[in-house]
Amino acid sequence: MRDAEKILIIRLSSIGDIILSSPLIRCLRNKFPNSQIDFLVRNEYSDLVKYNPHLNKVIEFDIRGGFNSLKQLTRQLKQENYSIVLDIHNSLRSRYIRHFSKPKSVHIIDKRIAARFCLINFKQNLYKKDIPVAERYLETTKELGVENDKKGLEIFIHDNHQNKIAENLLQVRSSDIKLIVGVAPSAKHNTKKWQAGKYVELLARLVSEQDALVLAFGGIEDKKEIDDIVNKVNEITCKQAAVNFAGELSLLENAAAFDYCNVVITNDTGLMHLAAARKKKVVALFGPTVREFGFFPYGTENIVVEDKTLSCRPCSHIGSKTCPKKHFKCMQDISSEKVYTEVKHILNIQ
């Protein structure tokens, strides 16, 4: 296939999924250095690809415009006359977009929906291999001769984001700090959340025994619950060594803040993938979801803490409001002692 193709990648949402597309973007550019490579994304997530040097253009879609906005978008894309569309979302919207934008060639992600359904509902594992989602995205380019460079995830940020975080940390970092721990203790779905009380136990111990500074991250909707964790840690330790940045930073400012962390402790969330994209050491807590779904930390040193003995796992591929079995053992049975041990292990602390 010749270079100088016009290529469109479609991935409308969400945080983790878009970050996981970064190897695809980079490897496409390696294969087609002279091609136009554009990325279609919902406007609220556009920062995640805005500064990517491997892209020619980021096309933003405002979902609030409804069907009229969708029709206008497809007319715009049809005029671009793309030769190749890579649909790594494969939703109703992306199907509509790829159909009516009339590209010459369409390549669609295989989400392994049947295997996922059987594993969740019948506990029958039909997955032949545990292929991470980032590599499933690359599967769409197999016919194009694109190869995985094995360099993992990446996210590009502006100097302004780095400068803001550097200024913020000057205000909270003291001379006796030996370790900076990032933590993302929330999640969109309740069953993906490790208990707040266990986060308090873990973080208080890291502050007291390892002289850690704790930086907590999340969205504006997470601010209150993370405030409770941070305040309790500071109360127990009699220090102001835990700081809540939830709701105060943009996604790229979060990425800049991760650069200062020695380790990031996180639930199965988009921020976990953001930390992986900054090549941070990650300790991730997984409850209702499993490796086969493809969303374990990718391309960075990591430890996943999970209970592999439970016959009820997985119960969902995205999490849910409540535990279907009412016992929530997948998270309840993960002790703060276990996670503390794994944090020390990944940091080579005796």
Image (cartoon, rainbow, N blue to C red):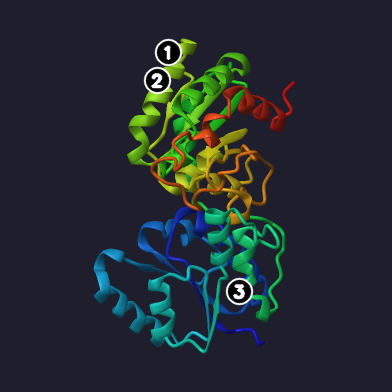
Going 47% across and 29% down the picture, which residue do you hit?
Answer: 195
Q: Earlier in the sequence, mark 3 or mark 1?
A: 3
In-image side of 61 versus 128 (left or right): left
Residue at which label 2 appears = 231
Going 65% across and 62% down the picture, which residue do you hit?
Answer: 126
The local secondary structure at tag 1 comes to helix
Q: Position of residue 141 (x, y in %)?
A: 63, 75
- Quarter occupied by the C terminus: top right
Residue type pointed to by label 2: Asn
The local secondary structure at tag 3 comes to loop
Please state which of the two labelled residues, at mark 3 or mark 2, is closer to the viewer: 3
Q: Position of residue 298 (x, y in %)?
A: 64, 51
Residue at which label 3 appears = 140
Residue 245 occupies quadrant: top left
Kindly report the distance in space between the C-alpha atoms of the residues bearing marks 3 and 2. Answer: 47 Å
Badge 2 crowding class, 10 Å Cα cut-off, few under 14, some 14 to 19, many 20 or more, is some
Numbered tag placed on residue 235 in the rendering: 1
Badge 1 crowding class, 10 Å Cα cut-off, few under 14, some 14 to 19, many 20 or more, is some
The local secondary structure at tag 2 comes to helix
